[in-house]
Amino acid sequence: MRLGMNFELKASSAVKWAEDLVALGVRATSFPLDYHADFKTIDEYRQAAEDYDIVIAEVGAWSNPMSPVKKEADAAFERCVEQLKLADHIGAKCCANITGANGDIWDGAYLGNYDPDFYRRMVEKTREIIDKAAPSRTHYAIEPMPYMVPAGPDEYLKLIEDVGSPHMGVHLDMVNWMNSWERVLNQQQFMDEVFEKLHGRIESCHFKDFTLEQKLTFHVKEVPVGKGIFDIDYYVKKINEEDADLPLMIEHLPSKTSFLRSMKYINKRYAGTTGVAAAL
């Protein structure tokens, strides 16, 4: 695996950005610019990543193209198309987003997320995003969510089949799928199922941990890697079996310091196999 982090590192130039990432042991990254940046700057960052052997794991399109508010849905659709074009231009592994929520909160839990007509329109919208962007070397990849499609590997396979595009891939977040007692209690079996069914389609992965809070009814809380009950050893094993260069991105931490602490911990736990600089 290639360990990376979803943290926007500020730098005075593209080369300095790449140098700083390498010094931190980062081997994969999310792209720090969006499609509004000028082409010259975009290409400078793309070239710097290539020169320093940093895989651009994902270009984020995080938005809700299925918003019930037309103005918001239209803006999100445009962002998804343009970010996917950007991902293709720079050779990123994927452009990542969620399918979208049937409510005001862009990533919210709504019963309407599973309405059959909403699903039909979601499939059409996803296909339209890919067709309009017309990528040739990257994928539009949906992040799994606990309460919207796809909330499991079978839903993911059906979504891929229904969209019907060779440029749709998988962005994997296993903790987001730890949404039932059965999956928490049988993590290894569930990961076996996920990696078997999605084999060959996974473009990038998120890395985090979770605990169960003592609240009714079933409540999962994200925590830093190694601070929870997620079987991270088995997760890393499955990722390395899938692809030794698969990006694994630490996310949802509050500061650069917390990201670096997690990277140090992971490097120590896996004896340098993650590619994190030993000097950290």
Image: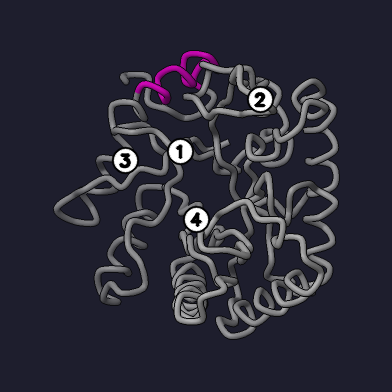
From the viewer's perspective, is 72 left or right of 242? left
Question: Pointer 1: what residue?
Answer: 251
- Residue range (magenta): 261-272
Residues packed near mark 4 inside 10 Å, few (<14), some (14 to 19) or many (20 plus): many
Give the mark nearer the N terminus: 4 vs 1.
4
**CB under 8 Å between discs 2 and 1:** no
Q: Quadrant of the N terminus?
A: top right
Q: Nearer the viewer, mark 3 or mark 2?
A: 2
| Residue at numbered disc 4 | 58
**Residue 201 appears in which quarter of the rendering?**
bottom right
Q: Disc 4 to disc 1, how far (Cα)? A: 13 Å
Contact (Cβ within 8 Å) of mark 3 with mark 1: no
Residue 95: horizontal and vertical position, in percent?
Answer: 53, 63
Q: Which of labels 4 and 1 is toward the front?
A: 1
Q: Which of marks 4 and 3 is in front?
A: 4
Look at the numbered discs 3 and 2 and tell me whether their residues touch, using CB distance below 8 Å. no
Give the residue drawn at x 78%, y 64%. Answer: 159
Q: Quarter holding the C terminus?
A: top left
Mark 4 secondary-structure assignment: strand
Kind of residue indicated by mark 4:
Glu
Real-space Cα separation, disc 3 to disc 1, in angstroms: 15 Å
Q: Nearer the viewer, residue 46 or 259?
A: 259
Residue lying at the far left in this picture: please name it. Answer: 12
Label 3: how many Cα within 10 Å (few below 14, some 14–19, many 20+): many
- In this rendered view, identify the residue nearer to me: 250 or 166: 250
Mark found first going from the N terminus, 2 or 1: 2
Mark 2 Cα within 10 Å, few/some/many (few <14, many 20+)? few
Q: Which mark is residue 50?
A: none
Q: Which of marks 4 and 2 is in front?
A: 2
Q: In this figure, which residue is indicated by the disc labeled 2? A: 216
Residue type, label 3: Leu
Q: What element carries label 1?
A: loop
